[in-house]
Amino acid sequence: MKSVWRQPLFVFGFSVVAFFLVGSFIFEWIFGSTPKQTFFVYEDGRLVEAAPLSPSWSNPLGTDQYGYDMLAKIMLGAKYTILAAMGVAAVRMLIAVPLGFAIGTYWQRRRSLINSFIDPLHYIPMTIFAYIMLYPVLWQPMEGFSTTVWERIVIQVVLMAIISVPIVASLIGNEANLLYQEEYILASRTLGASRRRIISRHLFPMMREKLFVLYGQQVVESLVVFAHLGLLYLFIGGTKVSYDPMFADPPKSMAYEWAGLFGSSFRYLQGVPWLPLAPAICFALLILAVAAMIEGYTRATNGQVRIPKQKKVSFVSKETIEWNQQQLKEKLQLIRENEK
């Protein structure tokens, strides 16, 4: 891991993510959970501008249509966006990794059948599944929510993680199956190693770097799906809906997370472009930071595979080694013939 911190790309990406995540908690601790609100701007006693206010020194990213400072909303919502994306990817990997290893080792004869059911899912946008499953959870009913913001976030994280588990498990299973056919794995099986030991001592160490890269890719995919759901007015933590028949307000984000800021202000793109562009740029910067971390980690660990050290064995004669090699070749041949 020391070499990772010497990679400028990884350090840059980590710094950006840490700035938004840690800065979000510090900002809320210093300035509170409610952004400052400015309705009008006066100069010499004369009204010169009303909300939404354009970017200025007092409001670097301007204000929304209700006068709330956009910079404050972005900083307050950063922790919800980042933690939700990381949570979705983490839960997805925790479920998919054991399933993937099982597909690649225990269920390798059924792997083709399993993949035949999973492969069509690659062509269906995950946003569709996410919208159908999350609408009853995130869309505020007329009587109000019966759950808290964090409870809805946890439910959303779990549901979004389950949606893509089959695809991720299939990818891991295919990679594990390729490694499972290697000569040294066949040798371990011949010597009596169980599948569990092969997974823990050989497959997982060989795939550890790829699993980290896959985790980063899942974080990016989660951020993209959040942005899509934001355009469909399904926001992280819940969508606040007004049911007033005369003066109903448009749907709002309850946590100031970036998907909600982007989705709820997208209609102002032509007249007030700083409203949707501010969260969109933050989304792009965060995705770029995660991609930089993946690239930096890949460069730092390229070709470095850490396999646990084996115990030293006592000296054996040359005749014994030759006999063992002959027996090993015969058993490898039998295993291949049986698998065919």
Image: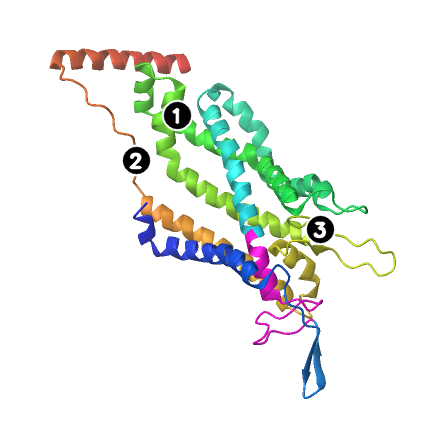
**Quarter occupied by residue 315:** top left
Q: Which residues are magenta?
A: 52-79
Residue visible at 53% across and 37% down in the picture: 91
User: What x and y, as percent, mark residue 84?
Assistant: 57, 46
Marker count (numbered):
3
Residues at discs 1 and 2 in contact (Cβ within 8 Å): no
Image position of 43 (left or right of 118): right
Residue visible at 71% across and 87% down in the picture: 45
Task: Identify the disc placed on residue 306.
Answer: 2
- Viewer-closest of 164 and 249: 249
Image position of 257 (left or right of 142): left
User: What x and y, as percent, mark residue 46?
Assistant: 72, 86
Quadrant location of the C terminus in the rendered image: top left
User: What x and y, as percent, mark residue 26?
Assistant: 51, 59
Which type of secondary structure does the marked residue at label 1 adopt?
helix
Which type of secondary structure does the marked residue at label 3 adopt?
strand
Instruction: List the residue tagged with mark 3.
Output: 239
User: Mark 3 or mark 2, which is nearer the start of the sequence?
Assistant: 3
Q: Whole-Å distance between the Cαs marked 1 and 3?
A: 43 Å
User: Mark 3 or mark 1, which is nearer the start of the sequence?
Assistant: 1
- Hey, what amino acid is under mark 1? Ile
